[in-house]
Amino acid sequence: GESVGLHLPTLSVQEGDNSIINCAYSNSASDYFIWYKQESGKGPQFIIDIRSNMDKRQGQRVTVLLNKTVKHLSLQIAATQPGDSAVYFCAEAHNMLTFGGGTRLMVKP
Amino acid sequence: GAVVSQHPSWVICKSGTSVKIECRSLDFQATTMFWYRQFPKQSLMLMATSNEGSKATYEQGVEKDKFLINHASLTLSTLTVTSAHPEDSSFYICSASPDIEQFFGPGTRLTVL
């Protein structure tokens, strides 16, 4: 949803550490979930997706975990790099795509 | 594949000017296109959904006469901000969807003086 008037939460990690970004979704009927990365001044970029018939999916350095029982989604980034610094949004889809509020990831060198 | 372009990428205009933003899917046909607005450090806010050849569906609180959307073809949608004012200054992002996944454009920064 929309976070009007609120600043994005920030996760600060050391370069090389693993990052975990969490997201709670609202619609139990949602059957498709996506993580996006947005760098400053740019549009969102697709990172990884997962369907509701799965609970884990791995990509290159990224893993998405889905817990439908508690309506929770997480994005794990292994060996975080400075280039991973961005805002990360989760999105849930049923008939339409609804975005979460976003988390800012800051990577310290 | 799945590239979406927006033009212009940045526009600065005087108050009262109407500004048109184009969104194109370059290598696929988009049955649905979406327009979002984003304020600094905030999430994307869906403004409207448009299907080719039909009127756009606007979200609650979005003025349809202020933000005119035309989805004339399966590869092009336009957003016109009519009589723009400083409060319309924002980052406008479109996305195009051939099915359920959305592919985003790079965004257009609008600054109204």
Image: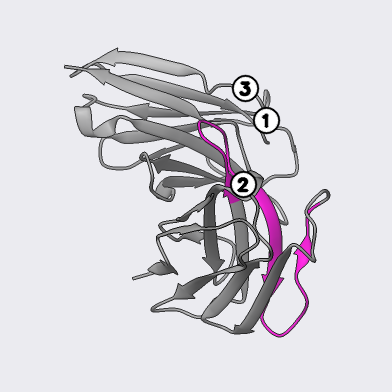
Residue pictured at 70% horizontal, 52% vertical: A94
Residue placed under numbered mark 3 in the picture:
A6
Label 2 – label 1 distance at C-alpha: 18 Å
Residue pictured at 34% horizontal, 20% vertical: A19
Give the image location of residue B54, x and y in percent: 76, 81
Work out which quarter of the rendered image holds the N terminus of chain B and state it.
bottom left
Residue A97 visible in the snapshot: no
Residue placed under numbered mark 1 in the picture:
A4
Label 2 packing within 10 angstroms: few (<14), some (14-19), many (20+)? some
Q: Nearer the viewer, mark 3 or mark 2?
A: 2
Q: Is residue B97 magenta?
A: no
Specify start and end residues of the magenta stretch as a single range. B37-59
Label 3 – label 1 distance at C-alpha: 6 Å
- Check contact, mark 3 vs mark 1: CB within 8 A: yes
Give the image location of residue A58, x and y in percent: 35, 39
Instruction: Relative to B12, say whether B73 is above or below.
Output: below
Residue placed under numbered mark 2 in the picture:
B86
Q: Quadrant of residue B74?
A: bottom right
